[in-house]
Image (tube, helix red, strand yellow):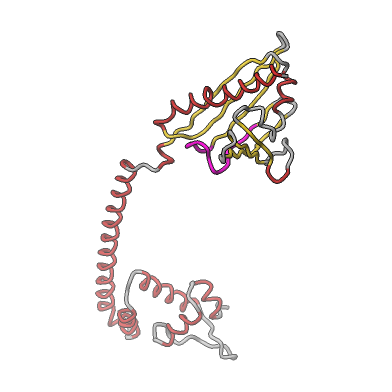
Amino acid sequence: MEEVLTIQEVAARTGLSVHALRYYELEGLLNPIDRATSGHRRYKADDLSWLAFLLRLRATGMSIQHMRTYIDLRRRGDATACERLTLLESHQQQVRKHIRELESHLTVIEKKMSFLGKNNVPARRRTTMAKAYYSTIFEQTADQVWAAIRDFGNYTWAENVSESYIEEGKSGDTVGAIRSARINNTDVYHRQRLLAHSDLDRFYTYEFCEPFPYPVRNCVVTLRVTPITDGNRAFVEWSGTFDCEASEYDHWTTYFPHEVWAKLLGSLKRSFSRA
């Protein structure tokens, strides 16, 4: 038994609205659709095949008027085959002309994209990934050094930090906690988010939050304390990876180790000497 579809099912298959299907039939683009005893339309395979062809004509720019002309010729039978072929050949030429125009437009767009890519490279392409590193030795034990810095919220051991606290009242070893550090009694605050924390391995890792205090992005920093068994001292490392302008690579890979981390760890050493 031949499959028949309701108007809703045909709308779902073709993407046309029920209103459009009714309009196509009303305008004579479709032959009168068979009806069920209830009066509802029932579409057959031939109806769907013809409708698919009409949609291709419409999608390639044929006007409703020319579609109606083609349909009138078709209904007159095989005697109009040459006229229908002529009409389709004319439409084919128009489609190919449109394709050439689109290709020409696309060529201009691609040239402009190439120009912009070479001469106005987006910031993400001008940046480079950098790594900075600093290490030093403390005369204190690793446990003593770690005890002084393990609380991520306690940053006042750094001489240039006048106040520090964890936002939202979280603890200083809670991953995701954000530290807010006030710099030198000014209105400048550095905000950093804790990404990892380990008492076993004596390290924590954090990233900078907005507003960024430096013109770098994706900055992830780790402060680590390792025991030195010879003399029971501590080896402290401060390292970070970040993205920066390629032209600024040398500056930032020198600045962070020597102007920031070395000075901060110098503060920590002085705090031990005052104890």
| Relative side of 112 to 217, left or right | left
Q: Which residues are magenta?
A: 205-218
Quarter holding the N terminus? bottom right
- Which residue is pictured at 56% across the width and 39% down the height? 188
Image position of 12 with respect to 131: above or below: below
Front-lying residue, 191 or 66: 191
| Relative side of 127 to 140, left or right | left
Q: Position of residue 123 (x, y in %)?
A: 41, 41
Quarter holding the C terminus? top right
Image position of 45 with respect to 267: above or below: below
Front-lying residue, 102 or 81: 102
Image position of 38 with respect to 143: above or below: below
- Which residue is pictured at 66% across the width and 15% down the height? 138
Does residue 75 appear anywhere in the picture? yes
Q: Is 181 within the magenta?
A: no
Q: Position of residue 47 (x, y in %)?
A: 46, 79
Image position of 120 with respect to 274: above or below: below
Front-lying residue, 79 or 205: 205
Q: How many marks?
A: 0
Q: Is 211 within the magenta?
A: yes
- Which residue is pictured at 31% across the width and 80% down the height? 70
Q: Quadrant of residue 30?
A: bottom left
Q: Position of residue 141 (x, y in %)?
A: 73, 16
Does residue 4 appear anywhere in the picture? no
Residue furthest to the front: 185
Front-lying residue, 236 or 82: 236
Q: Quadrant of residue 200?
A: top right
Q: Quadrant of residue 156?
A: top right
